[in-house]
Image: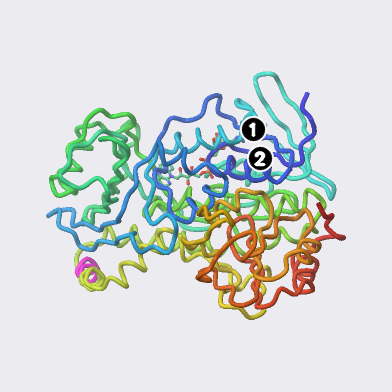
Amino acid sequence: MHTPSDVLVVGAGPVGLTAACQLARLGVRVRVVDLLEQATTESRAVAIHARSMEMLAAMGVLPQLEARGRRIDALELTDGRSGRTRVRMSLAEAPSRHPYVLDIPQPDTEAVLAERAAGLGIVVERGVEVTALTQDPAGVAVTLRSAAGEETARVGWVVGADGGHSTTRHLVGERLEGSFHGQTFAMADVDVETSFSPDTIRMFTHPDGMGILFPLAGSRARIMFFVAPPEPGAGDPTLAQIQALADARMGGRVTVRNPRWLTYFEIHHAQVPRYRHDRVLLAGDAAHIHSPAGAQGMNTGIQDAANLAWKLALVVRGHAAADLLDTYQEERHPVGASVVRNTTLLTNVGTASGVEAAVRNAALFVAGHHHRISDAAATRMAELTVRYRDSRLSVQHGGALRAGDFAPDPVGLTRPDGSPVAVEELLTTPGLLLLARGPADPLREVLGDLGTVLEVGADLLDPADSLRLGAAGMMLVRPDGYLGLVADTVDPALLRDYVAGVLHVVGEPSVG
Ligand SMILES: Cc1cc2nc3c(=O)[nH]c(=O)nc-3n(C[C@H](O)[C@H](O)[C@H](O)COP(=O)(O)OP(=O)(O)OC[C@H]3O[C@@H](n4cnc5c(N)ncnc54)[C@H](O)[C@@H]3O)c2cc1C
């Protein structure tokens, strides 16, 4: 017998676990089920980008992830035949507290998130599969099948984070739309010996198909090659086949051994038209699938979860009207569409031959000699260009910052005792975060238990005005790190309008 849950999260992959942790932190009762008896050991997504790290830091799990991963300083496009660099994109100048990629096998990421979930009182129920679902205006009835039999659970909301073959997606009558021609990759989780430096992710261009090398901790690495589909019944690739591909397409500079996982996998490029189906919300691979080029899949999903969770928490707790959830679709669907487009382009760029390859090489030559172009590409890959300036949740009343952008997190902020502090650290306190240069008490009265108000100059010191609040001003940071309201005054009426008129918060938030 389970205590009643507000939200059922279907799938304990990285996206489901992120959603569950964020919901639980915000006081929502969450139940998480996964059809697998044991968490997977397959490495799959191995790169965590800067924007995801910023969000994972606010969840309090980044140090644990860093302890298991390897920091990567640059991304390189390398000529697969000669091994020569075509263009190197340094991450050092990326506008983030985390100007690097964290390479870490997906099971480690999931283990850290599952630990965090356990700390929040969530026990992932394994061997439990969602098989049916019906919804009415008041809730969702979900059929769960396990070795113990079949159960019908009633919950308020369902987050479908059940991956590329999502049952939840199917049950709400949603379909992926896109290209299903299929592209096949041969993939290997191995130890490598290589003269390439381990601080760089490399994508090798080659007319037969690109290769990708992700260095992991120690001598471990994940490598992938775009290949022709294997003969039916051919089984997994052998280590010798992977070595032959590496010899041909990685400049003859990579030797593989100790295989942990060798497989072929086929990718498609597609996205669902609607992320929200009333009380059922789709996130991660359930909503979008695409090439692993650029390592965007898990990152985009983690950011979907962060975007959705705080909104769903406000609705579940009765603070906000359900139409706040439409902004999940409005903000995240275009991001997913752009990821599907760009990863398709990147895969084609890596695999071009003939005239197309000559054009590509010329473009890469130009990019390689103009740091602004290569830095911009690295920033995009790190998902640091994602912003919601046109969202109805982004409201501007003057001020130097832009509503809808990610909140700045400059070095130089301190607590009154002089100890350094980061905005992402302040976000570990659940709820909205209002930073104001000006009297905080009237703002606290408006925000009530929706979040925390910190007065810059009293609770937080910023002598160089690196937060760019000027002589007076405020910024409301959403729990996913984006700026909701930016103003050049600390007028409580503006905050009240935002909370009631934009977030559609119902009634007065209680104080204290
Ligand atoms: C072979 C392979 C290699 C990949 N390589 C990369 C890469 O290099 N880089 C990259 O960025 N991405 C890669 N990806 C994609 C990446 O793994 C996904 O983007 C990421 O796992 C998405 O996370 P998710 O939580 O949305 O889904 P998943 O990780 O797929 O998790 C979904 C979970 O839902 C559970 N589930 C499914 N159906 C049900 C049901 N009916 N009831 C209950 N539970 C259910 C599953 O058991 C699973 O645990 C790869 C994927 C594959 C398959």
Q: Is residue 119 magenta?
A: no
Q: Residue at x 51, y 29 (%)?
A: 39
The residues tagged by marks 2 and 1 sit, at their Cα atoms, a distance apart of 7 Å
Question: Mark 2: which amino acid?
Answer: Val
Q: Is residue 2 left or right of residue 34?
A: right
Give how far across and how far down residue 430 sits, in percent.
67, 49
Crowding at dot 2, Cα within 10 Å, few <14 / some 14-19 / many 20+, comes out as many
Locate the N terminus by quadrant. top right
The answer to whether the residue labelled 2 contacts the one labelled 1, judged by CB atoms less than 8 Å apart, is: yes
Quarter of the figure with residue 86: bottom left
Q: Residue at x 19, y 69 (%)?
A: 358
**What residue is pinned by disc 1?**
33
Relative to 440, does residue 480 appear above or below in the rendering? Answer: above
Question: Helix or strand or loop: what does disc 1 sit on?
Answer: strand
Q: Is residue 248 left or right of residue 168?
A: left
Q: Residue at x 47, y 38 (%)?
A: 64
Query: Mark 1: is the Cβ under 8 angstroms from ligand 1?
Result: yes
Residue situated furthest right in the rendering:
507
Checking the image for residue 9, the label placed there is: 2
Relative to 237, does residue 371 appear above or below in the rendering? Answer: below
Give how far across and how far down residue 434 sits, in percent.
67, 62
Q: Main secondary structure of the magenta part?
A: helix
Question: Mark 1: which amino acid?
Answer: Val
Please tell me which residue lies in front, 485 or 288. 485
The span shown in magenta is 355-361
Question: Helix or strand or loop: what does disc 2 sit on?
Answer: strand
Q: Is residue 12 left or right of residue 91?
A: right
